[in-house]
Image: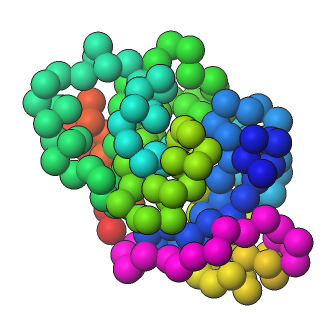
Amino acid sequence: MLNSENVIAYPTESMFGLGCDPNSEKAVKKLLYLKKRNIEKGFILVASDFNQIKMYINENNLLKKQKEKIFFHWPGPFTFLLPAHPRVPYWLTGKFNTVAVRISAHIDIIKLCNAFGKALISTSANITNMSPCMTREEVLKNFGKDFPLLNGKIGNEKNPSQIINIINGKLIRNV
């Protein structure tokens, strides 16, 4: 599914998410259309390990202390805004010079990223400004009964991941 430029729904730490190949402009445009989302917001990338996100970040712009903080919180429900690699497509960064990344501890995300062989976009399964889907039934009701949906259970987190800008230390989204 992901290799054929499709969008899928899958369980995350706190809700169902929508994802696609972050390198496919066609898939990302489908995702933007489904969510009625502005491209300027950018997207979060989720991965099973750091190697899956290295190509998207500019590691040279990270201090040792910043890396230590990141790895202290990963894997887990923490998204970090990191300096974007100059070749990262605009649809991932939006109007920013950072890329949002998370190394997940959720078993279904780990399996999905490992099967796909790389990171994928992770955004809540909902239409922008509506409540996120918490059940399979809600996903199918919102996106159609034939929408590609990975079987699994959402995790035990009550809120979406915290978002921390590692460059300036600011908490962007607190839970």
Residue 147 belongs to magenta span: yes
User: Does residue 94 show up?
Assistant: yes
The residue furthest front is 115
Most foreground residue, 43 or 12: 12
Position in image of residue 78 (x %, y %): 32, 54
Instruction: Answer with the quarter of the image where residue 26 lies.
Output: top right
Most foreground residue, 1 or 43: 1
Residue 98 belongs to magenta span: no
Q: Residue at x 64, y 37 (%)?
A: 22
Most foreground residue, 82 or 140: 140
Q: Quadrant of the C terminus?
A: bottom left
User: Does residue 172 show up?
Assistant: no
Position in image of residue 138 (x %, y %): 72, 83
Q: Is residue 5 above or below residue 75?
A: above
Chain part drawn in magenta: 143-159
Position in image of residue 152 (x %, y %): 57, 76
Q: Main secondary structure of the magenta part?
A: loop
Q: Is residue 84 above or below residue 45?
A: above
State the colouring used for the structure image: rainbow
Q: Is residue 61 above or below residue 74?
A: above
Give the left or right position of residue 52, taking residue 69 as reference: right
